[in-house]
Amino acid sequence: MKLVIKFDGCSISKSENINKICLYLKQLSITNEIVVVCSAINKTTDDLMKIAKFVETKDKKTINSLISRIIKNHKQIAVRSIDKLTIRNKLIKKLDSDFDDLKEFLAGALIIGEITSRSLDYLISFGEKLSINIISHVLLNLNCMSFPLTGKEVGIITDSNFGESKLLIDTTTINVSRTINSLLDRKLLPIVGGFVGADQYGHITTFGRRGSDYTATIIASCIRADEIWIMGSTDGLMTADPRITHNARVLKEVSYAEASEMNIFGIQQIHPRAFEPLLKDQIPMRIRNALNTQHTGTYISASTRSNINKPVKCINAIKHNGLIDIRGSMIGLQGTAAKIFSTLANAGVNVMMISQNPSESSISIVVQKMDLDKAVNSLEINLLGKLVKKIDVTTDVSIIALIGSGMRGTIGIASKVFNIISKNNVNVVMIVQGSSELNLSFIIRDTDCDSVVKSLHDELNLSIQ
């Protein structure tokens, strides 16, 4: 098969893991054409983001400490992963060159005392540049010929919206397919840094956090891969959080639509646009464990068989949120919701769930707990006493989401779910279900979350295949 395989930062954070992964890739490449996409080594991007903040305060001591930590971590991994001295020295020399570039960039930034969105993208792109060189040299140490490429070098072209760049698909498809296929024809294994591209002027851009997933699916689309594997620390998508429900199991297969819903509400976080490039050619994705390659993971495709006996596939929960009930004279007024949500958007608040009373007298919204004070203050300053008459706040609430395409058109699902909740003497604060019927979500207190998830998982028999 022609495969695109993406590894997250945790998978490649230790030398023993890297050696295990590279040995697996070598064996896999004997009978398959492979393209590897790598994130930065765990916590590297976080450290680079911290450096950017300390540049603005000109805190040289902390910046030097963070750089030293990055250098030490990467060099330790390099030394421990490679036993052939010539290859190890070659890698150290390449890493030192990249570190010199990083130090030179920061010296200039410190003089100005500012990191722009464009220079921030350049700064945080170093993480992937370092990781691909380590993986490539470890493969070389195993006598497997590879070729490291940044997102810019592989040909990913974006707009100039630094930090959250948008892909220019036509140009990218031509560039990437030509570059990758040329390497594969030469029996080289491309190792591509995720998360990063370049605009039409050659300036480094990034896709935002978890952008390596997006890079991988872009490449898969460009070369028309047979499958894409997202390799992380879990065996696949689960029927529930195993930290809550001990008998949660790995789902064998789900659809793109189901996986997108699970991504929003689940533990396995994938870039929100990662599925888009796969839809045209309906390229399947697998969620797999980088260190448990015997497990085939969760297979994600355009459509899957629905089990009429199990319309719900999984139960996901997000704890520690805030519920805001907004009441006022909204009946018949046009643009009321728009004013509320634009106020929250201007305050930088992401709204997770929405419910409106049929009488139009109130709107309830759910936000993350860390955004709660900011959301309430913004609404009070801009709308209270005008459009809004009263704002009530409930803290520490959980979103429970039941997901499954089998719920569509199945009678009695909501009744069964809320009967189970009633048996637990739990009060449901808010309920939302879209017209697709793919997701039934409701709000309960954090203190009730675990018991409700366990009960639903057991009563709906989700632990049984």
Image: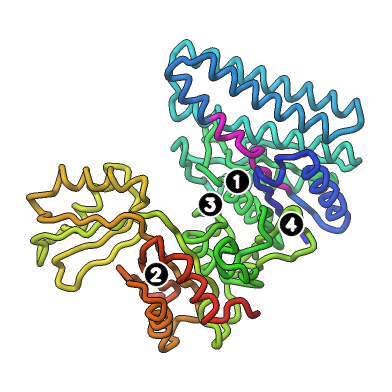
Q: Which residue is drawn at 76% across and 58% down?
A: 292
Which residue is disc 1 drawn over?
Answer: 212
Mark 1 → mark 2, Cα distance in angstroms = 29 Å
Q: Which residue range is magenta in the image? A: 36-48
Which residue is disc 3 drawn over?
Answer: 271
> Does residue 397 appear left or right of residue 272 in this picture?
left
Does residue 90 sit above or below 367 in this rendering? above
Would residue 39 be counted in the magenta stretch?
yes
Q: Earlier in the sequence, mark 4 or mark 2?
A: 4
Q: Which residue is drawn at 65% across and 63% down?
A: 236
Q: Earlier in the sequence, mark 1 or mark 2?
A: 1
> Does residue 284 appear left or right of residue 200 in this picture?
right
Q: Which amino acid does label 3 sit on?
A: His
Q: Earlier in the sequence, mark 1 or mark 3?
A: 1
Which residue is disc 4 drawn over?
Answer: 3
Category of crowding for the residue at label 3, using alpha-carbon neighbours closer than 10 angstroms: few (below 14), some (14–19), many (at least 20): some
Mark 3 → mark 2, Cα distance in angstroms = 22 Å
Which image quadrant: the N terminus?
bottom right
Mark 4 in CB contact with mark 1 (< 8 angstroms): no
